[in-house]
Amino acid sequence: MAYVYMLRCSDGSYYVGSTRDLERRVWEHNEGLGAVYTRQRRPVELVWHAEYEHVGEAFAWEKRIQRWSRAKREALIRGDFDALPGLAKKDFRKRRSGE
């Protein structure tokens, strides 16, 4: 089995990763043995995870979620799957001052 997971760091930011051993990996992050990003933002808390049969699937979801906005990540954490498509849309129109 493989997992994609999301941690809430002590500064309120989110970290997304993937692993074959979720419990060990969260422990490593909290011990300062995980990613450089989480070393300086401990303690971390596991706030979401999903299980996959193959590590490639978990890694692909990790990379996808890493590109998501904070609002979309928080909808995933809440389990608000209906909100996810709307949060994926961006407004590419230039905003002009005074409008």
Image (cartoon, grey):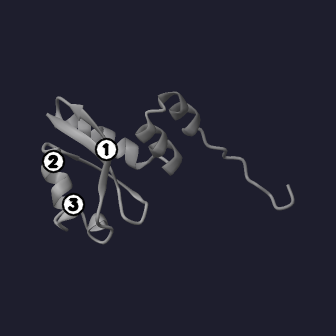
Residue holding disc 1 = 62
Identify the residue shown where x is 26% and y is 69%: 39
Q: CA distance from mark 3 to mark 2?
A: 10 Å
- Give residue 77's quadrant in the image: top left
Toward the bottom, the furthest residue is 40
The secondary structure type at the circle numbered 3 is helix
Identify the residue shown where x is 43% and y is 33%: 79
Q: CA distance from mark 1 to mark 3?
A: 16 Å
Residue holding disc 2 = 23
- Where residue 44 appears, as percent x and y from the top left, is 30, 59
Q: Residue 89 vs residue 41: left or right?
A: right
Numbered badge on residue 46: none
Badge 2 crowding class, 10 Å Cα cut-off, few under 14, some 14 to 19, many 20 or more, is few
Mark 1 or 3: in front is 3
The secondary structure type at the circle numbered 1 is helix
Q: Is residue 78 above or below residue 24?
A: above
Badge 3 crowding class, 10 Å Cα cut-off, few under 14, some 14 to 19, many 20 or more, is many
| Mark nearer the N terminus (3 vs 2) | 2
- Where residue 99 appears, as percent x and y from the top left, is 85, 54
Residue holding disc 3 = 29
| Mark nearer the N terminus (1 vs 3) | 3
